[in-house]
Image (cartoon, rainbow, N blue to C red):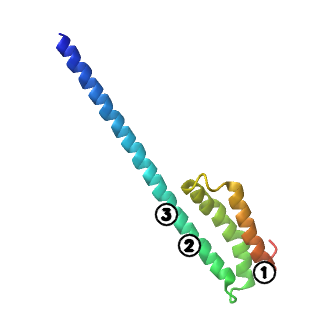
Amino acid sequence: MKTKILITTLFLILFTGCDNQSKVTEASNSTEIDSSIANTKFEKSDNRISKFLDRLDDPNTSQDARIQILCKEYPTEYKTNYMPALMKLSPGEYTEGKLIKDLDIALDYYKKKDNIQC
């Protein structure tokens, strides 16, 4: 009788340990997937922002296109895609306030350079 209780107890302990290990593995895989998705979103957004900046630096870009980029497209892309992905990838390094300040600096530079008011 004691052996049946001992075997049952050992079996339950082993089963519980294996079950907890699978939960840890699932959590780890979920974190890796989230990080991979954030990295992909960041790279895509960074490429779009780089294209915006290239167009703003191009002397052949029309004033209307510059206004569209500076007043709508660039800030929207930055706030909706770039910032969240960057803060997810480096949560301790970047804050929303710091990133908004960086955006304002960049926008102010191009607005003054091209004499644009939104």
Mark 2 lies on residue? 47
- In the rendered image, the quadrant that contains the N terminus is top left
Q: Amino acid at mark 1?
A: Lys
* Residue 80 in which image quadrant: bottom right
The secondary structure type at the circle numbered 2 is helix
Tell me: 65 left or right of 92. right
Q: Amino acid at mark 2?
A: Asn
Q: Amino acid at mark 3?
A: Thr
Tell me: 28 left or right of 43. left
Report the disc number at residue 15.
none
The secondary structure type at the circle numbered 3 is helix
Which class describes the residues within 10 Å of circle 3: few (<14), some (14-19), or many (20+)?
few
- Tell me if residue 19 comes above or below residue 104 in the rendering: above
Which label's residue is closer to the chain start, 1 or 2?
2
The secondary structure type at the circle numbered 1 is helix
C-alpha separation, residue under disc 1 versus residue under disc 2? 23 Å
Which class describes the residues within 10 Å of circle 2: few (<14), some (14-19), or many (20+)?
few
Mark 1 lies on residue? 113
C-alpha separation, residue under disc 1 versus residue under disc 3? 32 Å
- Tell me if residue 31 comes above or below residue 62 in the rendering: above
Which label's residue is closer to the chain start, 1 or 3?
3
Give whichever of 91, 57 is nearer the camera.
Answer: 91
Mark 3 lies on residue? 40
